[in-house]
Image (cartoon, grey):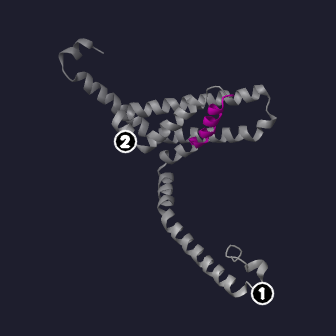
């Protein structure tokens, strides 16, 4: 890099940084990189579940090995967030809800590396389970599925409300018709359904 050349031509450094950012963004947005990060997230989730499954049987040395691998995953995810920041800079990065969610999960993971005997840090360690949710931001088909599930909440709640109304109508009818004959089952409204 010829620094004298940069001093003579205004904007040369800016163009150079812009090109570098474009290259980083191309690499970051590539399917290969996104699926690699998704595989890391899944591998971390499987490791966490496996550790909890065998935790009562683990020696201190084996538990320390699991913790070391978890530390490696945490720093890999930190590097991925930094790579994302370099690729998208401030405004695009902050404008993405998935980037903010990813950052929150990574920060929680970093904070949870504190002393394990402090209750606050124990609670923070529990929040690391949400790392798997980062997958929804990585894989487009999972994002579509999540969006479809989110948009179906309203109609499902409407159907559930209708079913509850029908159950309540039959409870009222049951109490009115059968409270004298079957008091054990239809004595009150709450026993009616």
**Residue 58 location, x and y as percent?**
79, 32
**Residue 62 location, x and y as percent?**
76, 28
Question: Is residue 136 a member of the stretch shown in magenta?
Answer: no
Q: Quadrant of residue 166?
A: bottom right
Q: Quadrant of residue 56?
A: top right
Question: Is residue 128 a member of the stretch shown in magenta?
Answer: yes
**Image point (34%, 28%), residue name:** 20
**Image point (53%, 67%), residue name:** 157
Q: Quick check: 157 left or right of 71?
A: left
**Mark whose residue sits in front, 2 or 1:** 1
Q: Which span of residues is magenta-colored?
A: 117-131
**Residue 52 location, x and y as percent?**
72, 39
Query: Mark 2 = which residue?
Result: 95
Any part of residue 86 in sight: yes
Seen from the viewer's position, the closer of residues 22 and 187 is: 187
- Quarter of the C terminus within the rendering: bottom right
How many marks on residues? Answer: 2
Seen from the viewer's position, the closer of residues 119 and 67 is: 119
| Crowding near the residue tagged with mark 1, few <14, some 14–19, many ≥20 C-alpha atoms within 10 Å | few
Query: Mark 1 = which residue?
Result: 181
- Mark 2–mark 1 distance (CA, rounded to whole Å): 65 Å
- Quarter of the N terminus within the rendering: top left
């Amino acid at each position: 890099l010829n620094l004298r050349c940069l001093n003579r031509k205004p904007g040369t450094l800016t163009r150079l940084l812009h090109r570098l950012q474009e290259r980083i963004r191309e690499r970051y947005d590539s399917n290969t990189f996104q699926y690699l990060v998704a595989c890391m997230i899944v591998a971390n989730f499987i490791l966490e579940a496996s550790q909890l499954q065998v935790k009562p049987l683990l020696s201190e040395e084996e538990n320390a090995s699991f913790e070391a691998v978890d530390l490696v995953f945490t720093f890999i995810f930190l590097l991925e967030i930094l790579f994302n920041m370099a690729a998208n800079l401030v405004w695009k990065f902050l404008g993405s809800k998935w980037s903010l969610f990813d950052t929150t999960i990574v920060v929680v993971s970093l904070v949870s590396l504190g002393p394990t005997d402090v209750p606050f840090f124990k609670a923070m360690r529990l929040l690391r389970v949400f790392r798997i949710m980062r997958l929804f931001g990585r894989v487009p088909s999972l994002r579509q599925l999540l969006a479809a599930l989110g948009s179906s909440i309203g109609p499902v709640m409407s159907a559930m409300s209708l079913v509850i109304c029908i159950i309540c109508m039959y409870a009222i009818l049951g109490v009115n018709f059968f409270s004298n004959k079957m008091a054990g089952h239809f004595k009150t409204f709450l026993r009616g359904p």
